[in-house]
Amino acid sequence: MRAETHNPPFFLGIDLGGTNIKSGVVDDAGQPLSAVSVETLAAQGPEAGVRRLAEAGRRAVDASGLNWHDIAAVGLGSPGTMDLAAGSLLDPYNLPGWDRFPIRARLAELVDKPTVLQNDANAAAFGEFWAGAGRGTQSLVLFTLGTGVGCGIVHEGTLIEGRHSHGAECGHMTVQMENGRQCSCGSFGHLEAYASATALVQRAMEAMAHEESALLRQSLRDKALTSRSIAEAAERGDRLAQRLMRETARYLAVGAVNLMHTIDPDIVLFGGGMIAAGDPFLDAIRADIRRLAFPLLRDRTRVAFAELGGDAGFIGAAGCARMALGVSGCKDRQESTFDTPRELR
Amino acid sequence: MRAETHNPPFFLGIDLGGTNIKSGVVDDAGQPLSAVSVETLAAQGPEAGVRRLAEAGRRAVDASGLNWHDIAAVGLGSPGTMDLAAGSLLDPYNLPGWDRFPIRARLAELVDKPTVLQNDANAAAFGEFWAGAGRGTQSLVLFTLGTGVGCGIVHEGTLIEGRHSHGAECGHMTVQMENGRQCSCGSFGHLEAYASATALVQRAMEAMAHEESALLRQSLRDKALTSRSIAEAAERGDRLAQRLMRETARYLAVGAVNLMHTIDPDIVLFGGGMIAAGDPFLDAIRADIRRLAFPLLRDRTRVAFAELGGDAGFIGAAGCARMALGVSGCKDRQESTFDTPRELR
């Protein structure tokens, strides 16, 4: 991570989460020079929060060995739904009081750099497209498997943001319209209600009511029943855990094929904590996709795990900032908020 | 439809169906100067078929009052899956023997004009975008409700064709992953298996096994049980028919909201024979969309019927030809097959 082995321009990415803020500086090829994490302190409200964002960015620049004036632009990834044109979040679940706070404009003031806002799952998808498992493709779909099911779609080099900043909210696509499980959003039958890490744990709890599993019961007693402990139990031969993982793979395959039959990307990626389940899980997803997809796509659409891990968000947010500076393909309306350094236009 | 009231350049659109070929000439604003229909004679094979396409085009030009040399380019819309880059169809259901026949190249030879191939549902979506109910939008989704559920997506002014020509095959998105109805494609739980005109009739037949409906039974006896007769029975107060139409509206709302949560377009359109059911049907779809969509989208995404009727396919195909001539935003790889008239570049 020595700055002198990287080429300018440099971009700062900031990934806002309910608990932590991750930030890092990346070079013009998407390679990170630094990666830092600070607590969000979400309860202190948006004004304190935006100062935490700037603080995280400052630390990331310090850790990169660069100076602040080396940074061409700043990208912020944030959870929840938002109004990208306004640069504000809409009633974010993990960030009480941040509703419609002008987060992009305030951050731009504090850092005194061109600043873009992007949905965190979109940012992660753009990160994988730019510098991760989607390098060299023209279009991809990324599912991020965690508390929820995040989704980002890159179509011909640009993110599908949607006309109301609600593009790629595919965790909230209905895959079971009759008697569907309830989703975190309140609706029923959404992919997220079946395939998130949270849903996996919930399904395990329900299944344990009428099916024995020594390993899962022990995890539950240890207050350690997580998607990871279920995946590990499956690996150790636990029948119930294996069935739960197989079902999860099938749900994800349904979601993936729905996007293959809509966007028809080069590659479908899975990221987030649940991919710690490893190759058996990926192989199960692939097998179900082959079973469900149109014949041509079975053979041609690649399916893989994401590569950037927890850095995807800030790398992709930095990439969105780079795009907005006109490197290629980003959104005009965000450029209009820029005071772009002349030499970078 | 007098040519002298329209402005050049002019484009010829041809819409290939299993039974009929529709064709027409449109002006540079997407207004048709002619519309003709000839039988496909699909059983005579692709070489005879492509001559029928050219014949339909010739008649459309004659009917327009223009001469063949007034036509700048030709667009062909075709059903089924295809390889757009190769310009050929892939095992089309209604066109036996046309698999991988180089339909675009052969038609271009016969008509001696730059020629593009497009999926018929995509072409219809582009037609509505250019000259129909989607005028003035930047992105739209069109569901065409007939034997199947066709879909086309215009995203920021261009069609989502997909990386393997399988974009917007959203009739084949899974909306019921457990115990789903079987789709025409063989898979289970697809939107098309619930919401097409064919599926509506099938569901009516099944329901009549255990629920009385004098009107529907009469239609069945008259061999006239169609989506239209079911819609008419609903309008005349038939309980079962009303329930079937309400269910159909809900299925379509699920499909629409899935696309709103993926593409987030300005407008969702419904076209095809089933929209003859009229405003009560549209209102029912809208009510279910409002119930199922994210709050912001409930208020902002427009939902409407398509406007171009059976002309959407040839108008949109002509529009794709126009785009490919470089007017804006069409696909480079199709332009490469063009011998573009210099004055139109």
Image: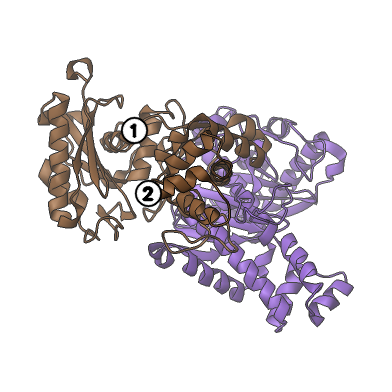
Chain colours: A brown, B purple
The foreground one among B131 and A66 is: A66
Is disc 1 on the same chain as disc 2? yes
Q: How far across and how far down the image is residue A328, in percent?
A: 34, 33
Q: Chain of mark 1?
A: A
Q: Earlier in the sequence, mark 2 or mark 1?
A: 2
Quadrant position of the N terminus of chain B in the picture = bottom right
For residue B304, say whether it is visible: yes
User: Mark 1 belongs to which amino acid?
Assistant: Ser
Indicate which label's residue lies in the foreground, 2 or 1. 2
The answer to whether residue B154 is left or right of residue A313 is right
Is the C-beta separation of discs 2 and 1 under 8 Å?
A: no
The amino acid on which the numbered mark 2 sits, given as a three-letter code, is Lys
Secondary structure category for the residue under label 2: loop
**B219 with respect to A271 (left or right):** right
Q: Position of residue A219 (x, y in %)?
A: 43, 45
Q: Position of residue B190 (x, y in %)?
A: 65, 53
Instruction: Identify the residue shown where x is 46% and y is 32%.
Output: A305
Q: Residues within 10 Å of mark 1 (few under 14, many from 20)?
A: few
Secondary structure of the residue carrying tag 1 is loop
Q: Chain of mark 2?
A: A
| Residue A328, numbered label | 1
Residue of label 2: A223
